[in-house]
Amino acid sequence: DARSLIAREGVASIKLFMAYPGRLYSDDGQILRALQMCADTGLMAMVHAENGLAIDVLVEQAIAAGNITPDFHSRTRPPELEAEAVHRAAVLSQVAGNAPLYIVHVSSSHALAEIVSARTRGVNIFGETCPQYLHLSLEDHLGQGWPNGAGFICSTPLRSKHDHHQADLWDGLRYDQLAVVSTDHCPFCMREQKLGFGESFQLVPNGIGGVEHRLDLMYQGVVAGHISLERWVEVCATAPARLFGVPRKGSIAVDMDADVVIYDPTATTVISAETHHMNMDYSAYEGMTLAGAVRTVMSRGDVIVDNGQFVGRASRGRYLRREVSQHIR
């Protein structure tokens, strides 16, 4: 059961999908039962919040009308259906006994507004966003058509640059309405995967790779004045470790692991598939020139990246048994 998983394996969170009927989807009854278990044990419920049943209707209608270009991935997953699912998840969390609830990859102003509303009602809810929603858009990226647009298909989808989603998400990070920045890293290759199943948006595997560039992409928010240096560290390191009960991680203090990044704010990073270390043949951020660069990375006191080059060794990793977080109630 859940308690034995926590004690034996260090499992401190589960993930639920309100999207993808017939595959990963959980209905409201299943979600409620899972949230009741989370309320009882303290497990964090991570929820992919999109109304999957309604999305399937819009996808079917788009295909029937011949609208199969990459931009229709976003147009058939409108922000209203993301917001509706966030609202529903928050209500179910309340009914379940205020279970710890974490909304993954928030992409829209609409969903953020539902998180803020739920927090004002006392719901134990946290939000996460990703760099792609802060830097990429429906028009400039999905709108490239075939084949390039396929590389930007992810769920939740990229949003319109005309609807202020990016500005609102940056504000959400600044004012602690969003707690964490992750990447939802999906290292699909363009040739074999993104373009391997046919030229229709619903056939393209969903996801963008970008874990290597998370710190650099988020540092641009510091440069632009959207967030402070301290908030950059908080959303990228401290808050994730605290919320997910990762021991000895997330801050520099006595009894913590000596995990340190030395960052050079005067350097420049140019993102390219030719130079990144991820096992992918393309980058969603190809050609972007960013202020700042990671110079040195230390893991438990050992230097594993020196002057931007990996110098670590295989099999030095350790399994960390997580604990139920004390920061989510």
Image (cartoon, grey):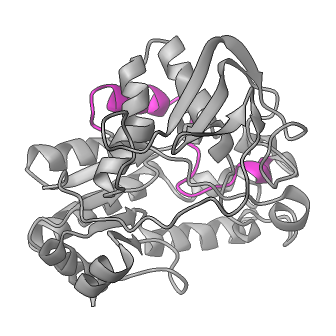
Q: Quadrant of the C terminus?
A: bottom left
Observer-nearest of 163 and 157: 157
Observer-nearest of 84 and 273: 273
Is residue 140 among the parts visible in the rendering?
no
Q: Please state the horizontal and vertical placement of residue 283, each as a whole percent of the image.
A: 79, 43
Q: Residue at x 33, y 41 (%)?
A: 179
Q: Please state the horizontal and vertical placement of residue 268, each as a whole percent of the image.
A: 73, 16
Magenta span: 149-177
Q: Residue 103 appears in which quarter of the rendering?
A: bottom left
Q: Residue at x 17, y 75 (%)?
A: 41
Left or right of residue 14, residue 87 in this image: left
Q: Is residue 18 above or below residue 273?
A: below
Q: Is residue 9 above or below residue 66?
A: below
Is residue 286 among the parts visible in the rendering?
yes
* Most distant residue in the top direction: 266
Observer-nearest of 35 and 306: 306
Left or right of residue 282, residue 80 in this image: left
Q: Residue at x 33, y 42 (%)?
A: 239
Q: Quadrant of the N terminus?
A: bottom left
Left or right of residue 226, residue 197 in this image: right
Q: Please state the horizontal and vertical placement of residue 69, each as a whole percent of the image.
A: 77, 55
